[in-house]
Image (tube, rainbow, N blue to C red):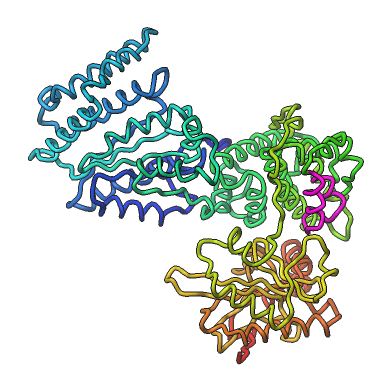
Amino acid sequence: MTGIVDQALKQDGQDSLDLGKYTKALLDFIEKTDTPMTIGVQGEWGSGKTSMLNQIWNGLDKRDIDNEQIKYKQIWINAWEHSLLCSPEECLIKIINEIISELVSADQQKTKAEKLSAGISKLARGAARIGGAVALGAAGKDIADDIFDEHENSIKQLREELRKLTTEIKGLETNPYDKFVIYVDDLDRIDPPDAVKILELLKNIFNIPDCIFLLAIDYQVVVKGLEAKFGKQTPENEREFKSFFDKIIQLAFKMPMSDYDIGQYISELLKQIGFEDEEDEKLDPDLITEFVNLTISGNPRSIKRLINSLSLIKIINDLSEEQDSDFLKNDVGATIMFAMVCLQTAQPDVYNLLAEYPDFTKWNDEIAFKKTQGKEMQEETFQENYDQAIKSDDFDEDWEKALFRICYLNPTSRLQTNNISRFFSILKDKFVKKDDTTELTSFITKALGQSAITSVTTKDSQNIRPPKGSYKPVFESGLEGWLENRATADTDKDNTRRYVNFLKENYNVLDFDQSKSLKDHSSDFVFKYSGAISLYYKTKKLLHLRAFFNKEGKSMMEIIFLKNPKYENKQLYLKKSEMRCPHRRKLHTFDVENKSYKGHPGFPEWLSGVGQSDLFSTDTLNFIVNDLVEMRENIDNKDKFITRKEVDLNIKIYKTADKNSEEFKNAYEWLLDIYSDDKEDQRFVELDI
């Protein structure tokens, strides 16, 4: 296969995004719920709403076969197709007419004429007249206005007629159906004001017994469609937008994009186009997932565009007889190409900047001025935001400062500046050795040369003025700010406060002041509040911590901390806390014959443990911190620490050396020893704390 069609997952298709539990939950809800019921499946453009509806349809079909008690009549409506070249009123009539036709077909023993009452017949005839008027170029609105005669309160009558029809069909001895499930798809492809108008009209027919409506809708489309009524959305009027939505939707389901198994999804697509081998994976799933999350995000439609670009690039590469034709067969080359197409898809201006200056580590103020002519300085908020940004880890190097200046004038890039900086930092950390950027720059140059064929840019994009205040600092100012803005829905705020406050009181831990560097704080201990709560000692990170509720509602403590050479870098089992602290990620299932393995080398210098909060005492936390401080103070020999660099070197030997050589054997045994988590082979140290 050489390309991925941008279409929804088929009703019997394989779910690569691993959404089975959500589909099953919705199926169970549909099976058990009282009616009438309206379910809104929400998500941004391309997030997989139609695929989800298809899986529900398929699931109900299977339940029809397996379950004799409940039978479903399913009706699929494409709202966008019905809306073409007509008003919202005409669109509604067409939708209702299709629903009627499908309902009528539910019982094959009676003719359509016998089933339709006078009101329904009038509607059906009107819809047919509208269809003919549109086809002939005539205005259908007058016909619609005639049908929607306000004096007759015709929408209410239509709802009553539909209610009678469903009741009649349900009561027939020859009717096999118990519930009518009506899907309304592609509402968010309609112009927002019209989409809202159609929703307003549709809500009048949702209250029909035995009927379940599933609407695929992007909430932001509703917001845009209501701006003429409520104005731009603000914190003050947000309730009005939500109230409109709540009047229509009885159950809101948001596509769980944060739970998508992006690594698996991308890996399967890459194998389909031949970019990745079925057996020998060239690309690190975790690394490519990071590149995706920092650029195009997890939107399935955007990922398909990315995959199609890679497919075309690979075809051209395979046909090439030039020296670089083996570029994609190299693990690093394939990874860099993937990263460059991610950047090209999400940030074309930054991609073009890289094409001009491929060694991004050499970017400086001079290059920034060439691109911006200093226009960013004219923004009244720039200097304040810039001064704040360069105090963070994301913008403390010259090339990062130049990137910040260049991105500031482009609203799209500006909002994603932190992610762009991290994207390049990953490239640097992963592929630059001993500060020599020559090899990475060479790979980037080759990737840019081959990927240019799929580039789409606009020259004027940097002249667009960004909205004021769109830049957000990397760190929260304190714990309460973190709990308000960064904590996830499952965060146990009380226990998080308990652990943080304990450390503050016992170690004089200060909150990170973004106006200072870490070394300029008056205490050796500093908390940074970003994606996680991190404890630093003398500018070095010691640990991350958080408290959260698990699926059973129990409060759990998670702590991620450095391995200690005092325990020979072994993993730990904290007996009193019943907390097992293994690698965050690990290699496993070594196949010596083929010199392969499964898993990911992850972060070999860090351990991660999760235990119940009521067992994980502050004494345990105190022990861990003291142990880590002692390690930092007393161990100067860096060779005693396990590092990712050392792991990568042994992985390279394991993959490339002769498997009969002593070098290969030593590398294999070293990796096996480092990544084993079997208590019986002494890789765990039990501590009675």
Q: Residue 177: percent from the left, percent from the top?
A: 18, 42
Q: Residue 126: percent from the left, percent from the top?
A: 25, 17
Q: Is residue 401 above or below residue 346?
A: below
Q: Is residue 612 above or below residue 127?
A: below
The residue depicted at 82 percent of the width and 52 percent of the height is 387
In front: 173, or 272? 173
Q: Residue 367: percent from the left, percent from the top?
A: 89, 40
Q: Residue 505: percent from the left, percent from the top?
A: 69, 81
Q: Quadrant of the C terminus?
A: bottom right
| Residue 451 in view of the camera | no
Report if residue 635 lies within the magenta region.
no
Q: Which residues are magenta?
A: 382-404
Is residue 398 found left or right of 679 in the rendered image? right
The residue depicted at 10 percent of the width and 31 percent of the height is 109
Is residue 173 found left or right of 302 in the rendered image? left
Q: Main secondary structure of the magenta part?
A: helix
In front: 448, or 651? 448
